Image (cartoon, helix red, strand yellow):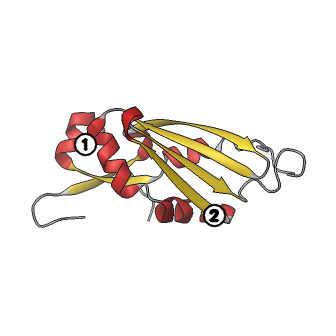
Amino acid sequence: MTSKTQQTVQLPLYQLAHGRAGDKGNTSNISVIAWDQACFDILVTQATEANVAAWFGYRNPTKVTRYVLPKLHAINFVLEGILDGGVNDALNLDTHGKGLSFWMMDMPIEVSQEQAQKLSVKEYAQSV
């Protein structure tokens, strides 16, 4: 994608942050902790409730709530209705939803080529 002033590339979110997931009942809690302030600023604009809901659309979350924690360079997402009923009801292999943080870390994020070079990463390879 190209903007008027500079070219951008897509990177997987894990190249800007790390994450952790937890659960309570049928709700998953995913924390995204940016590597630095610049990465955090990018994530605040792109890791929105709507974008995360769309990224997890295959799991049909009933609600996605985002909590921005600027002093920690972190964002916490609460995804309701995403764990197929939770630990006691789900028949899937990941009843706690720990694997959901790995899926979140693969979400494409658009960054400037300059920022990508600072992160020393390669462009996100998407299958067409």
The quadrant of the rendering that contains the C terminus is bottom left
Instruction: Please tell me whether residue 115 is drawn above or below residue 89 in the rendered image.
Output: above
Query: Residue 95's spot in the image, x, y percent?
Result: 79, 44
Of circles 1 and 2, which is in front?
Answer: 2
Q: Quadrant of residue 84?
A: bottom right
- Name, please, the residue furthest toward the left: 5
SS category of the residue bearing label 1? helix
The three-letter amino acid code for the residue at tag 2 is Lys
Q: CA distance from mark 1 to mark 2?
A: 32 Å
Q: Residue at x 58, y 44 (%)?
A: 30
Within 10 Å of disc 1 (Cα), the crowding (few <14, some 14-19, many 20+) is some
Q: Amino acid at mark 1?
A: Ala
Q: Secondary structure at mark 2?
A: strand
Outermost residue toward the right in this view: 88
- In the image, residue 76 lies at what x, y percent? 52, 45
Q: Is residue 128 visible?
A: yes
Mark number displayed over residue 63:
2
Kindly identify which numbered label has been placed on residue 43: none
> Is residue 78 toward the left or the right of residue 10 in the image?
right
Residue at 17% from the left image edge and 65% from the top image edge: 3
- Residue bearing mark 1: 116
Residue at horizontal 56 percent and vertical 57 percent from the top: 65
Q: Mark 1 or 2 closer to N-term?
A: 2
How far across and down, in percent of the image, does residue 108 sit? 41, 54
Along the line of sight, which residue is nearer the eye, 113 or 61?
61
Q: Residue at image x 37%, y 34%?
A: 71
Give the position of the N terminus as an image quadrant: bottom left
Q: Considering depth in this image, is 17 or 44 the residue closer to the camera?
A: 44
The quarter of the displayed image where residue 7 is located:
bottom left
Relative to 40, is 108 above or below? below
Residue 98 visible? The answer is: no
18 with respect to 65 (left or right):
left
